[in-house]
Image: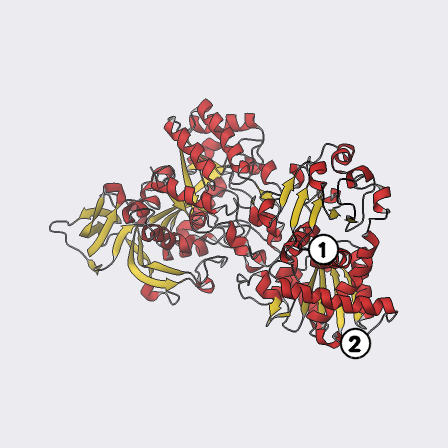
Amino acid sequence: MSMQHGTHPCAAEGATSRLLIRQGHVIDPANGIDRVADLAIADGCIVGLDPQAFQADETLDARGLLVIPGLVDLAVRLREPGAEHKGTVASECRAAVAAGITTICAQPDTAPPIDTPADVRLLHQKATAAGRARVVVLGALTRALDGEHLTDMAALAEAGCIGVSNAQRPVPDLLVLRRALEYASGLGLSVHAQPMDATLTRGGCAHEGPIATRLGLAAIPIAAETAALGQWLALVEQTGARVHFGRLSSAVGVRMLARAIADGLPVSGDVAAHQLFLSEMDIADFNPQCHVLPPLRSQRDQAALRAALADGTLTAVCSDHQPHEIDAKLAPFAETRPGISGLETLLALTLRLADEGVLTLREAIARVTAAPARILGVPAGTLSAGAPADLCLLDPDAEWELDADRLHSRGHNTPFHGWPLRGRVRRTLRGGHTVYLADEDPSA
Amino acid sequence: MSTAIPRPGPLPGTLQVRDGQLRHLLTIEGLGRPLLEQILDNAESFASLNEQGVKKVPLLRGKTIANLFFEPSTRTRTTFELAAKRLSADVMNLTMSASSTTKGETLLDTLRNLEAMQCDLFIVRHAEAGAAHFIARHVAPNIAVVNAGDGRHAHPTQALLDMFTIRRHKGDLSSLRVAVVGDVLHSRVARSDIHALNTLATGEVRVIGPRTLLPAGVEQLGVQVYHDMDKGLRDVDVVMMLRLQRERMHGAFIPSEHEYFQRYGLTEERLALAAPDAIVMHPGPANRGVEITSEVADGPRSVILEQVTYGLSVRMAVMAMVMGVKDAFDT
């Protein structure tokens, strides 16, 4: 499948150099590889491991480094068009590769939303011009995300959309949703959903529980997620449409997803990295950096999300990247904009899951590489021979402290400021080209 | 405007108390019993002055107090204004909802402008929970902040005047049963009262109301939950009625005011279930015939007007303390 409209994934780079990455610890979950090896790259594509008689133009010494596929991030807000003061395709793609992410899936809820082929092409053009991460695009499920009128999905697919989504906007009319699922599945398009019942979410900004009660914040119950999920699942069963549920937040939600998977429904799920490390407790001082949608839930939910990640119910971890300008978080909690600038903590938080014993290192890497690539249906997240040479070299032992001021993203809104983290990207390659090099990065 | 990224601030308890002294008053939570009792003791000094007829003292002469009301209120604003004037402070009343914030100015822009006017104390009322905390975190270090009600979160001076009223009538709270009745979900008064009652080690704190008007996990605030008014009122020493916050209700919380009154309205008959010398409180304004009858509201056990009177003394004490002149009235 094409990564961008009308281009071959490797040839598009126009790369001709032959590169040998020597003696790195290669972890490629897609192929079950976990060993020290030489990795050969030619013409922007992976040649293979430990090649015989490979004549390299350039050799990189990767001793002591992990060599992993470039990360694939399922949910990113690029903010362009419409909110360039929060982020642009160029700024966020630059942030992505600095964090080892080589493929990002842009959500359609821009202003205006991505609901025409021209919008899709424009994003691809901007991404190509930026020359950093690959951008794959979800088109809008309904026109202007209005929840009422289907978009021209065939045209969106032709323009290169890899799926459709209504992002966080509701589709209150279930008949419209059913038709949308039928139509999308007829085109072979997957549908990406963030289950949130709008009526149960309305006005809320915090998880319904003791913390919201104590702080007097309007609450969002678990049922906002599960009621919507139940409706979606009923329609998936009816239509057979392939649906990916993103950013699940609750124990009951993942239990419902597990049942649906066990029943053989064509569904999958992911979780935002911050949901695995933060809980409702983190808003106890009205910290607006912890204002997210769905809200940070209870520690019990957090444990269930981790367990679901470990048992494979949730196959992917994403950043749910939502960069904001400073003023968006400078107000009383409920008046602040929800969302975290998450690109640059995705890898370190995922590695931390391995440190904390939630996943093995290989599993953790799979959750941000092979699994999300499979969900998107793109030839990424793997070091298979012939795949685009998108990869990340990182020092797994490098300890660092997150400084929000030094994020590459235009959005510096993160609750992880000051957190000690481990695992630092040294170099990111896309299509065999170096698109990020820590040695040249003053903020690294 | 600073371009610094906002960082998580300290918890309210540590933000509002410095070196054991009251720096801001944002919430009752985390104040601690000694400080809470000290506020009540200081309020007692002012109450004595008022009762002796000396209504004005020069403690805050030369200080400027800004009443920043982002949400309409006449009663609370008036009592804060009167309390400030009795301390000889200059007072500015700013109704912010009709002012610059509606023209796109941010809350911080507004604050910076007021800081530039050399104000010493902000009295803040805001429709959003945490607004006073937000302001206290960003205000210049020489300015104190008193929360006059933020969303559903806190109304600490109301709770203090409620405690003052109970203490005057009942003395020690440790043997008391106190019931908080009604719309706890939307009530900042209820949250602050519950914190204050528990801080003062009240014998038993109950909340009574329909499930739709009690927030999730309310029992974790340290209360016994009752949905049956008759059972909840049995043998209580203090009945704290809450106003039905109809303006905050955007959904089907109760079927009708009639049914609400039938199940949760405080009548003479229901009050008879409480202890014989039980007192009845209400933060006002009361919806007569909805949450309380006029007979009870105006009856011999009602202390509602005393609450208003004591509100002045409590607010004088709080203002003096956050301005660092608490010792001046110890004599």
A145 sits left or right of B69 in the view:
left
- Residue A33 appears in which quarter of the rendering? top left
Q: Amino acid at mark 2?
A: Arg
Where residue B201 sits in the image (x, y, percent)? 63, 56
Which chain is home to disc 1?
A: B
Q: Residues within 10 Å of mark 1 (few under 14, many from 20)?
A: few
Residue B61's disc number: 2
User: Can the viewer see residue B90 in this picture?
Assistant: yes
Callout 2 secondary element:
loop
Q: In what quadrant of the picture does the C terminus of chain B appear?
A: bottom right
Q: CA distance from mark 2 to mark 1?
A: 33 Å
Where residue A31 sits in the image (x, y, percent)? 23, 42
Q: Which residue is mark 1?
A: B102
Q: Amino acid at mark 1?
A: Thr
B93 sits left or right of A367 in the view:
right
Callout 1 secondary element:
helix
User: Which mark is in front, 2 or 1?
Assistant: 2
Q: Earlier in the sequence, mark 2 or mark 1?
A: 2
- Residue A374 appears in which quarter of the rendering? top left
Which chain is home to disc 2?
A: B
A224 sits left or right of B272 in the view:
left
Query: Camera-side residue: B314 or B143?
Result: B314
